[in-house]
Image (tube, rainbow, N blue to C red):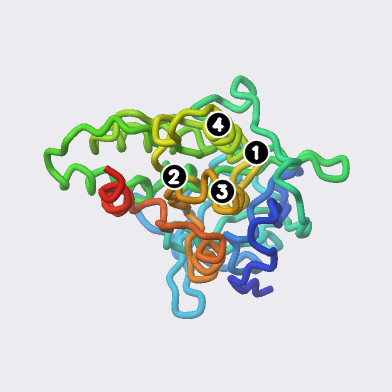
């Protein structure tokens, strides 16, 4: 079954499509925007001395794709009939991976307001790998943090902090930067990296709705907006309100429309760039490219000094 990269949802509607799948009878989900294709379990070539949760590689349409054993990673048992298992082929952070799951249930259209942030105690706090819980037609679907899974298995796929280190000595900038990022791990790394780049005044929010509430309060405070925020950096997929909806609200608000908005997401591709541009995003950067993010921030904020 081929899933083309075209995103069917209109930008800014605060909805997403979730592909439901199971592992050992437990229900999980992945944003369809990350999915290229699903296929029946394929023979793979093992790779010596690789991570224990990497099954190996196989070739599909002239691409060599790494296969991740998701059951093994989650500490769940393998299926009874692995020949009928499924590979979910993904594309995010400018890379392709195949996640080995047991069954695919189907695709649901869900509002981000139906997705809640997992409890930190139950889902492991900073070590957790669930970004959201979707309540859909009486089913609780655990949406996994696939970026974190890949970064743990292959650290080179995480934020490229060395890119910032290569920028050399930088001046301290205490202007307030608002960040909307739901992944606890990536949020912490992003704040630390921006601090290293000289941006020391970071206001961190866990989703687009929290960021929007902050912006509304700032706009209604009577203060200069720049006293509260000079730039917004937002992920795209977040519970409660996604980055596209947040961008649309900001750019349609007469008090906020001049605020620079940077979409910093693993989902940036040609189609997403088109949607982000239609909504008025000032820049769109793929998540590993933290050095590029800092350079874009420098450029956007220089004219506002």
**Image depth: mark 2 or mark 1 in front:** 2
**Local crowd at mark 4 within 10 Å, few (<14), some, or many (≥20)?**
some
Residue drawn where x is 78% and y is 59% of the image: 106
What number is the disc on residue 233? 2
Q: Residue at x 60, y 33 (%)?
A: 213
Question: In the displayed structure, does residue 23 sit left or right of residue 185?
Answer: right
Percent x, y of residue 43: 54, 67
User: Are the two marked residues, 1 and 3, in contact with CB atoms closer than 8 angstroms?
Assistant: no
Q: Would residue 28 be seen by someone viewing this image from the given angle? A: yes
Q: Callout 3: 10 Å neighbours few (<14), some, many (20+)?
A: few
Q: CA distance from mark 3 to mark 4?
A: 16 Å
Q: Position of residue 185 (x, y in %)?
A: 45, 34
Question: Disc 2 to disc 1, how far (Cα)?
Answer: 20 Å
Between discs 1 and 3, the one toward the N terminus: 1
On screen, residue 215 versus residue 258, left or right, reads right
Q: Residue furthest right?
A: 138
Residue beneath disc 4: 214
Q: Which mark is residue 286?
A: none
Q: Which residue is mark 1?
A: 132
Label 3 element class: loop
Distance from label 1 to label 3 (Cα)?
32 Å
Q: Nearer the viewer, residue 244 or 2?
A: 244
Outermost residue on the left side: it is 169
In the foreground, 33 or 124: 33
Which of the two labelled residues, at mark 4 and mark 1, occupies the earlier sequence position? Answer: 1
Q: Of label 3 and label 4, which has the lower sequence position?
A: 4
Quarter containing the C terminus:
top left
Position of residue 85 measured from the top left corner of the image (x, y, whole percent): 68, 59
Mark 1 lies on a secondary structure that is: strand
Q: Of discs 1 and 3, which sits in the foreground?
A: 3
Which disc number belongs to residue 254?
3
């Amino acid at each position: 079954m081929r899933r083309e990269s075209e995103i069917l949802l209109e930008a800014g509607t605060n909805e997403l499509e979730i592909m439901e799948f199971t592992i050992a009878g437990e229900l999980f989900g992945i944003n369809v925007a990350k999915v290229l294709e699903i296929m029946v379990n394929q023979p793979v070539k093992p790779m010596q001395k690789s991570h224990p949760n990497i099954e190996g590689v196989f070739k599909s349409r002239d691409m060599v794709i790494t296969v991740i054993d998701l059951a093994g990673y989650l500490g769940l048992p393998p299926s009874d009939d692995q020949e009928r298992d499924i590979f979910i082929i993904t594309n995010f952070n400018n890379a392709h991976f195949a996640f080995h799951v047991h069954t695919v249930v189907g695709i649901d259209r869900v509002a981000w307001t139906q997705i809640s942030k997992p409890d930190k105690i139950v889902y492991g706090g900073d070590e957790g790998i669930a970004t959201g819980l979707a309540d859909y037609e009486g089913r609780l679907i655990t949406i996994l943090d696939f970026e974190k899974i890949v970064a743990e298995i292959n650290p080179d796929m995480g934020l490229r902090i060395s890119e910032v280190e290569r920028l050399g000595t930088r001046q301290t900038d205490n202007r307030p930067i608002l960040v909307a990022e739901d992944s606890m791990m990536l949020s912490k790394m992003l704040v630390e990296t921006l601090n290293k780049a000289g941006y020391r005044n970071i206001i961190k929010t866990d989703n687009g709705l929290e960021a929007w509430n902050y912006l509304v309060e700032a706009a209604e405070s009577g203060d200069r907006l720049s006293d509260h925020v000079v730039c917004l950096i937002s992920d795209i997929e977040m519970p409660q309100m996604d980055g596209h909806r947040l961008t649309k609200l900001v750019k349609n608000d007469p008090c906020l429309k001049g605020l620079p908005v940077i979409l910093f997401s693993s989902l940036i591709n040609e189609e997403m760039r088109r949607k982000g541009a239609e909504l008025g995003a000032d820049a769109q950067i793929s998540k590993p490219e933290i050095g590029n993010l800092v350079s874009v921030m420098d450029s956007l904020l220089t004219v506002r000094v």
